């Protein structure tokens, strides 16, 4: 675990990452160039029924973005503001959430799961390791 230093420019990229997509990877790639450390924070929400359990989501993130320089994978429960304060992070990173932001570029984990569930090819939307995990989840 990295040492928390207030002088560092630290950002948190929170989400469920169920599953991690190429869009998520792109956001992390861009953010790590702007900050000393990017914490990819996986939300643990007991009220949601994720496709991938928390340990599997953490592992997929570790295999896809966790090896990048100045990127750390973490989990959090509760309020994001409390987690950010504990990590001494000054910035929260968010991806695009609406089609109107950039026409025809919106892609969500929910949409990727639906395509995979229906037998569609998601290999252009997610890292290879995630595509394999999705095929395994939805295998007949």
Image: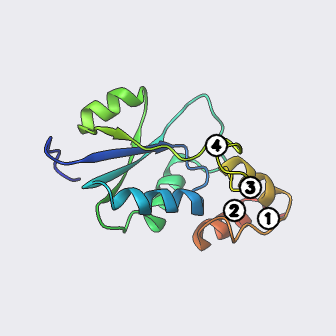
Horizontal and vertical percent for residue 5? 14, 45
The mark that comes first in sequence, 1 or 3, is 3
Does 20 sit left or right of 85 as displayed? Answer: right
Does 10 sit left or right of 7 as displayed? Answer: right
The mark that comes first in sequence, 1 or 4, is 4
- The residue closer to the viewer here, 9 or 79, is 9
- The residue closer to the viewer here, 68 or 18, is 68
The mark that comes first in sequence, 2 or 1, is 2
What secondary structure is found at the residue carrying circle 2?
helix
Q: Which of marks 2 and 1 is in front?
A: 2
* Contact check, label 3 and label 4, Cβ < 8 Å: no
| Residue bearing mark 2 | 134
CA gap, disc 1 and disc 4: 17 Å
- The residue closer to the viewer here, 99 or 118, is 99
Report which quarter residue 119 is drawn in.
bottom right
CA gap, disc 1 and disc 3: 29 Å
- The answer to whether residue 124 is above or below residue 10 is below
Q: Residue 50 carries which label?
A: 4
| Residue bearing mark 1 | 139
What secondary structure is found at the residue carrying circle 1?
loop
Q: Which of marks 3 and 4 is in front?
A: 3
Name the residue located 29 percent from the left edge and 54 percent from the top edge: 35
What secondary structure is found at the residue carrying circle 4?
loop
Q: Nearer the viewer, mark 3 or mark 2?
A: 3
- The answer to whether residue 102 is above or below residue 120 is above
The mark that comes first in sequence, 4 or 2, is 4
């Amino acid at each position: 675990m990295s040492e928390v230093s207030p002088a560092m420019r630290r950002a948190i990229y929170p989400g469920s990452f169920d599953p991690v997509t190429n869009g998520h990877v792109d956001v992390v790639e861009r953010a790590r160039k702007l900050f000393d450390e990017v914490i990819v924070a996986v939300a643990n929400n007991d009220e949601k029924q994720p496709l991938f359990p928390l340990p599997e989501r953490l592992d997929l993130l570790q295999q896809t973005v966790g090896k990048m320089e100045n990127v750390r994978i973490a989990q959090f429960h509760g309020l994001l503001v409390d987690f950010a304060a504990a990590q001494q992070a000054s910035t929260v990173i968010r991806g695009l959430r609406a089609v109107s932001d950039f026409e025809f570029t919106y892609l969500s984990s929910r949409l990727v799961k639906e395509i995979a569930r229906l037998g569609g090819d998601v290999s252009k939307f997610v890292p290879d390791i995630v595509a394999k995990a999705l095929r395994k989840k939805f295998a007949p």
